[in-house]
Image: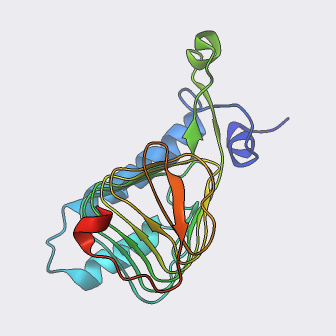
Amino acid sequence: MKTEKEKMLDGELYDANYDKSLIEERTKCKTLCFKYNNLSPEKIIERNELIKKIIGKTKKKFLIEQPFMCDYGYNIELGENFYSNHNLIILDCAKVTFGDNVFIAPNCGFYAAGHPLDYKTRNKGLEWAKPIKVGNNVWIGGNVVVLGGVTIGNNVVIGAGSVVTKDIPDNSLAYGVPAKKLKNYNYIILSYTTLF
């Protein structure tokens, strides 16, 4: 018989609310996030050392501005030259993978977790999780939400305030609720105010 964690990692319905093992793992991770968020911003070395204890895989060059929160941490992978501005939230019940040169503006959320539409099932504390994958050279504007099961391709810009519910292909600009690909581009030069 599978554990609730195994069900979670396999994308099946699992008990997120009442499974003791998962609650302990989340508490441990959130305690580390609390310590991270309360370090002085000038303590870059200590911050990076602590984030490496939280996140499953990092490369050499990254910076996550405080505050930062996640559920488990071990399901998160950061590529080289990763940057996120303040208030990044990652619900990493499934794998959440970021490629190289990913820049994330403030107040963004990556939510691998999902809940059943049927309230009786949902009220039992059951949920599911689907992975999120972000490619290389991606810029994500402020207040963007990315839902589970989404892949964002390489060389993509997601406009501020978007909710990404479906895959976004390589070399595209997408925004809106829900986010839609508006155009392909190679080397388009647009002003900041035009996009956002």
Horizontal and vertical percent position of residue 125: 57, 23
The answer to whether residue 173 is left or right of residue 33 is right
The answer to whether residue 63 is left or right of residue 155 is left
Q: How is the image coloured?
A: rainbow
Horizontal and vertical percent position of residue 136: 55, 79
The answer to whether residue 87 is left or right of residue 23 is left
Front residue (pair 155, 172):
172
Residue at the far right in the pictured view: 1
Horizontal and vertical percent position of residue 140: 40, 65
Q: Could you tell me how many numbered marks the image carries?
A: 0
- On screen, residue 14 above or below 64: above
Horizontal and vertical percent position of residue 35: 26, 60
At horizontal 34% and vertical 50% (from top left) the residue drawn is: 161
At horizontal 69% and vertical 37% (from top left) the residue drawn is: 4
Front residue (pair 161, 148):
161
- On screen, residue 47 above or below 179: below
**Quarter holding residue 39:** bottom left
Quarter in which the N terminus is drawn: top right
Residue at the far bottom in the pictured view: 60
At horizontal 63% and vertical 56% (from top left) the residue drawn is: 167
- On screen, residue 36 above or below 63: above
**Quarter holding residue 117:** top right
Quarter in which the C terminus is drawn: bottom left
